[in-house]
Image (cartoon, rainbow, N blue to C red):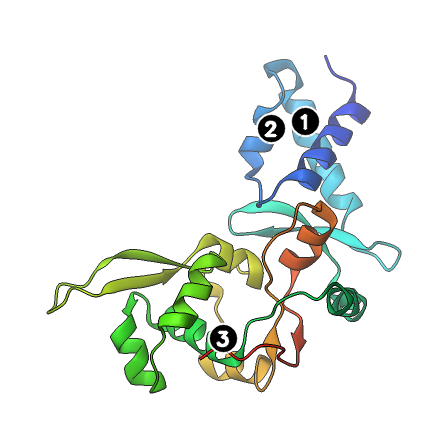
Amino acid sequence: MTEHPEIEAALEAVLFVAAEPVDREKLLEIFGGQDREAATAALERVIERYVGGPDKGVRIEEVAGGLRLVTRPELHGYLRKFFEVSGRTRLSMAALETLAIVAYRQPVTGPEIQELRGVSPAGVLKTLLEKRLVRISGRKKVVGKPFLYRTTREFLMHFGLGSLDDLPPLEEFEEIFGPDGVDLGGRTEERQQEMAEESFGVIESLESDES
């Protein structure tokens, strides 16, 4: 039987390296039958350890159906400065508006987005697809059979949502992300950057102008 400290250390290590939230059951499957009960208790201790006190830079949160290590929201100012120094790319207001349309009206087509925004969304949709914030979910059965777009699990992760039911009212969304953009740059190979990037949307001035 594995010692309890080793189980806790293993759980912590898995959460640290995981690129996406990890389901509790998948975490516990790592351990054999004899260790299952101990692993369940160890997981609760790890979660309690990362409640997120003032002396902690990271905490554990449950999002998109799984657990992940994230940075504390109170530290977003430091992380914003770090990403500014690192030269991260940010979503423009055009991209954010398009993402909001997809999120609140999905499934939605490119022509429907264009009708609402007044400009072609082709370039913005390409960016959102590359960042894995939206996906193609089929074609609408109308003339031309345009693609249908939906948000992804990555979208839930970036915005800290458990499901689409957790989306705030559209008016609140517009207030939160008003005249500024959100840092949602692509992932890097450095896990420290991934953790910071995935844990929150930093509200800041736009550095790009997608149309």
What numbered label is drawn on residue 96?
3
Q: Which amino acid does label 3 sit on?
A: Leu
Q: What residue type is labelled 1?
A: Ala
Q: How crowded is mark 1: few (under 14 residues within 10 Å), some or many (20 or more)?
A: many
**What is the x, y in percent for residue 116?**
32, 84
Q: In this view, does 122 lie to the left or right of 67?
A: left
Q: Do the residues labelled 1 and 2 touch (CB within 8 Å)?
A: yes
Evaluate whether residue 162 shows in this view: no
Q: Which amino acid does label 2 sit on?
A: Leu
Q: Quadrant of the N terminus?
A: top right
- For marks 1 and 2, give the CA distance: 6 Å
**If you read the primary sequence from the N terminus, does the residue marked by circle 1 or circle 2 appear first?**
2
What numbered label is drawn on residue 39?
1
Evaluate whether residue 205 shows in this view: yes
What numbered label is drawn on residue 80?
none
Frontmost residue, 69 versus 162? 69
Q: Is mark 1 on a helix, strand or loop?
A: helix
**If you read the primary sequence from the N terminus, does the residue marked by circle 2 or circle 3 appear first?**
2
- Residue name at image x 47 percent, y 79 percent: 94
Q: Residues within 10 Å of mark 2 (few under 14, many from 20)?
A: many
Q: Disc 2 marks which residue?
A: 28
Quarter location, residue 22: top right
- For marks 2 and 3, give the CA distance: 37 Å
Frontmost residue, 99 versus 163? 99
**What is the x, y in percent for residue 27?**
60, 32
Q: In this view, does 20 lie above or below 11?
A: below
